[in-house]
Amino acid sequence: MADGCQSTHIGHKATTFLPDGGDARPTAIPEAADQQPRQWSLALASMWIPTVDITDEWTARFARFSEFMQETLTTSMVTLWTTSPVWTLVLYIYLLVNVESLRTFLVIYLAYCFFDPRPYDGVGRRFSSISKLPLWGHVNAYFQPKMVFEAPLDARKKYVFGSHPHGVIAYVSQLIAGSTGLGIESHFPGLVVRGVTMPAAFAVPFFRDYVLAMGCLSCDRSSIRRILSDRHHRLHQSLLVVVGGAEESMQAHDGSANLVLLKRRGFIREAIRAGCDLVPIYNFNENSIYKLVDNRPGSWIHRFEMAVKSLFGFTILIFHGRNIFFTPYRVQLVSVVGTPIPVQRNWDPSESEISHYHQLYVEELSRLYRKYQPKYAPGAQDIRFIA
């Protein structure tokens, strides 16, 4: 090209502009020469840019997000369940103080809580449909509860089940005795198991209605006798009692198996009076759901717990969970149901008769624990009867 000339490329043709304004004839660029640089560019791009399947990537992201949301929902629902005695009471107080239009109704409702006879009549206000709540699916996914039966149970008979240990709030006993679809009744259709708890639980607004709907009743003697009474033969009810009570809950340290049983004879007496076979149950990892703070005898925490117990019959424990919301620790809950101990009915059992069946019960529970502890709680201590 001559000096002073400029050239530019337009499309696939080159045009030369002459200094005097003349226009040379356009000359075409060979097709092969024009495409060769583009082919090199595509080859280099294919070497450095990996092939990505966008559909698979977003599917994986959505799956991870769905799994995260499901886990969050499960954890939240389980936390609400385990802390229900607290937040239901807080909710009642909040509504009473801040919602003036509901105040009269809430005061009447509170009075009704104290005078309602249903927790003590042996029948209660049970709703079997509560087992269909989605809540139990979340509880099942979180704790993966399991029941092991050493012998089959006869739905035509009545039993007195003793549940050990108490734990912080006896969560496993709620699962295996109530209308949850996860307990004893789900394994033996026709068997009706009524759990019992302290009368104070029926004074907590809102929470009491949940307890009643689960089929739970008061643990006082008259209520227990009504549950096992022949007058309610159409219900054919069995009884589940958490034997250790508040005193044992103070021993619910992770990995421990300290039971209050040697002085607990009332449930043995009621089983003999009603002619119900005795069945011990040990709930492995119940004490691992929450962590108790150090409350050894002589500490200020122990003195506080004992003072509350002496005043109200129950105690307030100081414990913690996974976070500030008291989310329970995630452990598998395993309930092992022992072999029924045959009991001969006697309306007025003697002390020696009660002692005989009590000794059989203690021996069966000890055997049960030592047989299954290596499998379901290998790091736990040996069983120990402290009172």
Image: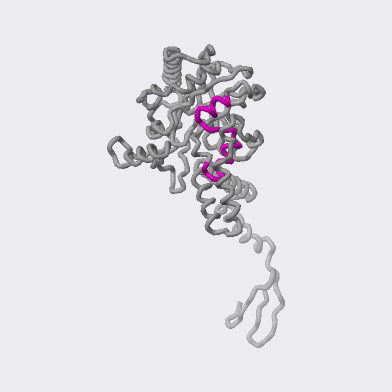
Q: Residue at x 39, y 21 (%)?
A: 262
Q: Where is residue 298 in the image (x, y as percent from the top left)?
A: 27, 37
Q: In this view, does 268 lie above or below 20?
A: above
Q: In which quarter of the image is the N terminus?
A: bottom right
Q: Is residue 186 above or below residue 139?
A: above
Q: Position of residue 106 (x, y in %)?
A: 58, 51
Q: Is residue 297 above or below residue 193?
A: below
Give the farthest residue toward the bottom.
20
Query: Of helix, strand and loop, which mostly describes the magenta segment?
Result: helix
Q: Nearer the viewer, residue 144 or 346?
A: 346
Q: In this view, does 258 lie to the left or right of 234?
A: left
Q: Position of residue 60 (x, y in %)?
A: 59, 46
Magenta stretch in the rendered image? 203-227
Q: Which residue is drawn at 72% across and 77% down?
A: 25
Q: Is residue 117 left or right of residue 11?
A: left
Give the tally of numbered discs: 0
Q: Does the magenta stretch include residue 213?
A: yes
Query: Colour scheme used in the picture?
Result: one colour
Give the farthest residue toward the right.
25
Q: Position of residue 290 (x, y in %)?
A: 43, 38
Q: Is residue 341 magenta?
A: no
